[in-house]
């Protein structure tokens, strides 16, 4: 395993849609500390609204290792396409940035965006004749699994009742500010 005194956190590029494969391989086979955050949210598809899970940073994972000892093994690890470099040097990511991101995700690697709709939320209608419209929720009717929304039509606001399944809740982003986004830096 690596020596914590010499190890730093690096940004690795994963193969397309294989971030979790890369993270699992690096953890299980190389014993590395890896951070590969994911987000789970509702998305409109041809089949209707479904839950999907995606990488928060598509094609990237963050791993702590000593490049002098592990760089070659990491370059050829399953799911990894390479190490991000700046000027020929592997790009490091400050621990504070990863810690801030982990804190915003409440210590978890999977952030589940709330599927809950509340009065006052701006939602997108994803099915029916109003598909694509952004509307404001004026009333939630859980027993009927419906919501009333305010829609600007014909020069005025009108309240319309739609199925709860036909609206996407507002997206919640686990990164509350750009300060929480990891940025790779040149190795010094």
Image (tube, rainbow, N blue to C red):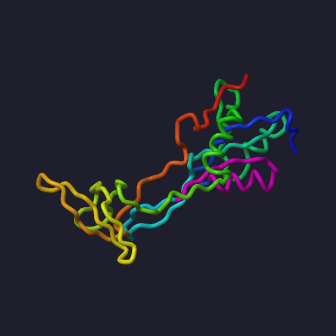
User: Image point 55% across, 58% down: which residue?
Assistant: 112
Viewed as shown, does residue 76 lie left or right of 117? right
Residue 47, located in which quarter of the rendered image? bottom left
Q: Position of residue 151 (x, y in %)?
A: 22, 57
Magenta region, residue range: 19-40
Q: Position of residue 142 (x, y in %)?
A: 39, 73
Viewed as shown, does residue 32 lie left or right of 43? right
Vertical placement of residue 76 versus 169, above or below:
above
The number of numbered discs placed on residues in the rendered structure image is 0
Q: Position of residue 123 (x, y in %)?
A: 35, 57
Residue 164, located in which quarter of the rendered image? bottom left
Pick the residue in front: 50 or 73. Answer: 50
Q: Position of residue 28 (x, y in %)?
A: 79, 56
Residue 3, located in which quarter of the rendered image? top right
Would you say residue 122 sits in the magenta stretch? no
Pick the residue in front: 43 or 186. Answer: 43
User: Image point 65% across, 49% down: which residue?
Assistant: 36
Would you say residue 33 sits in the magenta stretch? yes
């Amino acid at each position: 395993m690596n020596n914590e005194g010499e190890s730093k956190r690096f940004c690795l590029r994963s193969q397309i849609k294989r971030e979790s494969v890369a993270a699992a391989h690096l953890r299980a086979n190389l014993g590395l500390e890896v951070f590969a955050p994911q987000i789970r949210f509702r998305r409109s598809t041809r089949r209707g609204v479904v839950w999907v899970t995606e990488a928060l940073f598509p094609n990237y994972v963050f791993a702590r290792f000593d490049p002098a000892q592990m760089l070659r093994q990491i370059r050829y690890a399953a799911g990894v396409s390479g190490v991000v470099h700046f000027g020929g040097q592997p790009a490091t990511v400050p621990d504070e940035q990863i810690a801030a991101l982990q804190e915003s995700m409440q210590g978890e690697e999977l952030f589940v965006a709330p599927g809950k709709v509340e009065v006052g939320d701006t939602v997108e209608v994803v099915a029916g004749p109003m598909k694509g419209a952004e509307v404001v929720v004026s009333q939630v009717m859980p027993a009927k699994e419906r919501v009333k929304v305010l829609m600007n039509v014909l020069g005025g606001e009108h309240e319309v009742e739609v199925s709860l399944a036909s609206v996407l809740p507002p997206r919640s982003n686990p990164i509350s500010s750009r300060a929480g986004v990891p940025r790779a830096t040149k190795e010094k």
